[in-house]
């Protein structure tokens, strides 16, 4: 089994290729939940849903968000009635949010709820929330703190970022299922997701770094030069005092991940890194990268 640490865009593109190389039941994915938010009375888990929809065959891979072919009648009506639903939510996607919210309100953990939803959608991979208690990534701006979804979706990443912090009532503890998946894996792949908002929240969960200590761990850079392949990773890395490059990313992961992969076009040099084509512009490129990563993992064991 291979376990991935994942956010909602870069790593799912890699997972799409890995599914052609391994069976779904041979893949576990530990997913960031620090971007989750209650909106319009329901619990939205964007990264969990993207991964779950990928494995169920429902993901819109044009946007890497939501359900392909979804309708938006409820969203349009909510906007007409109250005007403040700034995240576009499809009708089938919302049904998942409603089901999740009902189970959470009834006392089930997020891990239990995710397992139930995966079963209902026919997902055979292990999709695991990083923790069962709420964690939120907040972005500090001159106008005040914003939930990451407000910063990135509502305001389209326009506010000047002064810092990033995680908030919670209870320090996040990795679930038993997360620790078991890591320890039983042949290797762990840290996908090319945003280091600040997708990967660090997972690594900050108590128990994760110690579980990774005796595993073959390999990370894929989300940067080429000083630009991320997608999203606000560069701005957020700078705000946290890190160099927004592959080298800066490597330094973040170095203590738990000595094996690092960067793009063949990347002009930044990372000592000891491996090179591969990480621009997964189509599924064939994703498959090619997946096969290389498995080779790297097996050589590192």
Image (cartoon, rainbow, N blue to C red):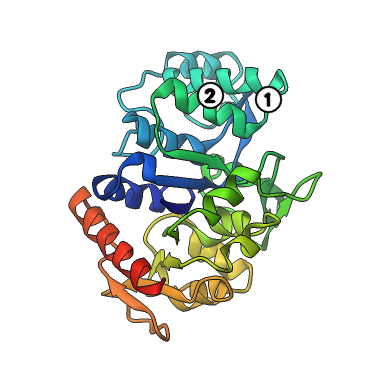
Q: In this rendering, does residue 41 appear at all?
A: no
For residue 116, which numbered disc appears in the image?
2
Seen in the image, is 173 located left or right of residue 194? right
Going 77% across and 50% down the picture, which residue do you hit? 171
Could you classify mark 2 by the number of other residues whose Cα lies within 10 Å: few (under 14), some (14-19), or many (20 or more)? some
Q: In this rendering, does residue 212 appear at all?
A: yes
* Cβ–Cβ under 8 Å for marks 2 and 1: yes
Seen in the image, is 41 located left or right of residue 86? right
For residue 230, which numbered disc appears in the image?
none
- From the top left corner, tell me how far across and down residue 151 is, in percent: 59, 47
Gap between marks 2 and 1, in whole Å? Answer: 10 Å
For residue 108, which numbered disc appears in the image?
1
For the C terminus, the image quarter is bottom left
Q: Is residue 294 above or below residue 60?
A: below
Seen in the image, is 202 located left or right of residue 62? right
Seen in the image, is 35 located left or right of residue 8? right
- Where residue 246 sits, quadrant-wise, is bottom left
Question: Which of the pair 107/89 is nearer the observer?
Answer: 107
- From the top left corner, tell me how far across and down residue 2 is, in percent: 41, 53
Q: Is residue 104 above or below residue 238?
A: above
- From the top left corner, tell me how far across and down residue 80 is, in percent: 53, 15
Q: Is residue 243 above or below residue 277?
A: below
Could you classify mark 1 by the number of other residues whose Cα lies within 10 Å: few (under 14), some (14-19), or many (20 or more)? some
- From the top left corner, tell me how far across and down residue 165 is, in percent: 70, 57
Residue located farthest toward the left when viewing the structure as drawn = 284
Label 2 or label 1, whichever comes before in sequence order: 1
């Amino acid at each position: 089994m291979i376990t991935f640490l994942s956010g909602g865009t870069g790593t799912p593109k890699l997972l799409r290729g890995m599914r052609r190389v391994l069976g779904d039941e041979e893949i576990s994915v530990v997913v960031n939940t620090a971007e989750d938010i209650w909106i319009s009375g329901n619990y939205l888990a964007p990264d969990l849903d993207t991964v779950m929809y990928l494995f169920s065959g429902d993901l819109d891979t044009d946007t890497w968000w939501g359900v392909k072919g979804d309708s938006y009648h409820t969203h349009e009506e909510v906007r007409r009635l109250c005007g403040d639903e700034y995240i576009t939510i499809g009708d089938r996607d919302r049904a998942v949010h409603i089901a999740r919210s009902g189970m959470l309100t009834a006392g089930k953990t997020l891990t239990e709820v995710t397992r139930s939803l995966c079963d209902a959608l026919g997902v055979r991979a292990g999709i695991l929330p990083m923790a069962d208690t709420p964690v939120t990534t907040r972005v500090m701006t001159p106008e005040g703190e914003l939930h990451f979804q407000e910063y990135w979706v509502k305001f389209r990443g326009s506010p000047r970022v002064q810092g990033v912090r995680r908030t919670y009532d209870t320090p996040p503890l990795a679930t038993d299922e997360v620790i078991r998946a890591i320890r039983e894996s042949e290797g762990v792949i840290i996908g090319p997701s945003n280091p600040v908002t997708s990967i660090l929240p997972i690594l900050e969960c108590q128990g994760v770094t110690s579980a990774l200590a005796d595993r073959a761990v390999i990370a894929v850079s989300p940067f080429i030069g000083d630009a991320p392949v997608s999203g606000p990773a560069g701005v957020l890395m700078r705000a946290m005092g890190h160099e927004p490059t592959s080298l800066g990313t490597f330094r973040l992961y170095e203590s738990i991940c000595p094996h690092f992969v960067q793009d063949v076009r990347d002009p930044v040099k990372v000592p000891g890194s491996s090179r591969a084509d990480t621009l997964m512009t189509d599924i064939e490129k994703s498959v090619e990268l997946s096969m290389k990563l498995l080779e790297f993992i097996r050589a590192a064991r």
